[in-house]
Amino acid sequence: MTITTFEEPAKTELRAACEVAIDQAGYAVATTLQRVPLPGLNGVLKGEVQSLNADGERTFYYVRTVAQDAVPKWLANIARASHELHAGEMYIVVREYSAQFMQSCIAAGAGLLLLNEDLVFEVVVPWAESSPQELEAALTEEINQLRRSMERKLKLTTDALTARYERTTGLVADMEDLVAASYISKVESEFKAADDWSIEISRLLDGVTSKDDATTLARVRELIEAGPASSDSR
């Protein structure tokens, strides 16, 4: 099994289970992970695991340990590109999935495999039958603008919180331990609220696949306009 530095335990476990499933399917686990550059994009087609069939044809597997409703943007870009690279099939491997995630895989061009309790792959979306959809240029630009707006507001918020935290550490020096800990904890909770806010917006934007997702885009605009929840409490 290939060991990846600083990999989360859940991902290491799922990757190892994926290798068992590949072996049970009659394929060989690739000992060397091939890196295939993506034309016009940053990154490569690689995955966490790769397999080879009897003809030497390669398959790329991306393991996902957290249930989501949409394929993340970076992974959707790789999935779409995989249909033009002719380097091999590309699959996302999960232990559970939602109907929304399955549709997101189809739209992105990713195959979807369910790894069951017997460590056997169940094909949910065959890679060859997925239908990668390119977003309209105007919609792509709108999504990018919304991401940039979110990132700017997040930076402003975290910069302000960092300044408060630095002031707080000086203010609590003479406080009782419990009072000081409570004060610092409040600031730290606001950092988390800002992170959660940005993650939720990114999740919603990752799920936008067409101009018909107007409700989602409107929700994103509302969230960005409101800013992180913590900003209302200051």
Image: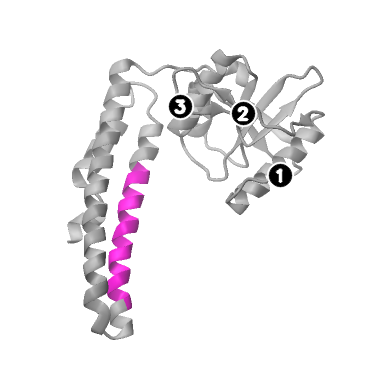
**Nearer mark to the viewer, of 2 and 1:** 1
Mark 3: amino acid: Asn
Looking at this view, is 155 or 224 the one in front? 155
**Nearer mark to the viewer, of 2 and 3:** 3
Looking at this view, is 214 or 175 the one in front? 175
SS class of the residue under badge 2?
A: strand
Identify the residue under disc 2: 91
Q: Residue at x 25, y 33 (%)?
A: 218
**How far apart are the alpha carbons under marks 3 and 1?**
27 Å
Q: Residues within 10 Å of mark 1 (few under 14, many from 20)?
A: some
**Nearer mark to the viewer, of 3 and 1:** 3
Report whether residue 214 is seen: no
Magenta span: chief secondary structure: helix
**How far apart are the alpha carbons under marks 2 and 1?**
16 Å
Quarter of the image that includes the C terminus: bottom left
Disc assigned to residue 72: none
Image location of residue 203, percent across then percent down: 39, 39
Ranked by sequence position, the earlier of labels 3 and 1 is: 1
SS class of the residue under badge 3?
A: loop
Identify the residue under disc 1: 16
Q: Residues within 10 Å of mark 3 (few under 14, many from 20)?
A: few
SS class of the residue under badge 1?
A: helix
Mark 1: amino acid: Ala
Image location of residue 140, percent across then percent down: 32, 22
Up-down: is 47 above or below 66?
above
**How far apart are the alpha carbons under marks 2 and 3?**
19 Å
Identify the residue under disc 3: 42
Report whether residue 201 is seen: yes
Judge from the rendering whether residue 114 lies leftward or rightward of residue 67; answer left or right. right
Magenta residues (range): 181-200
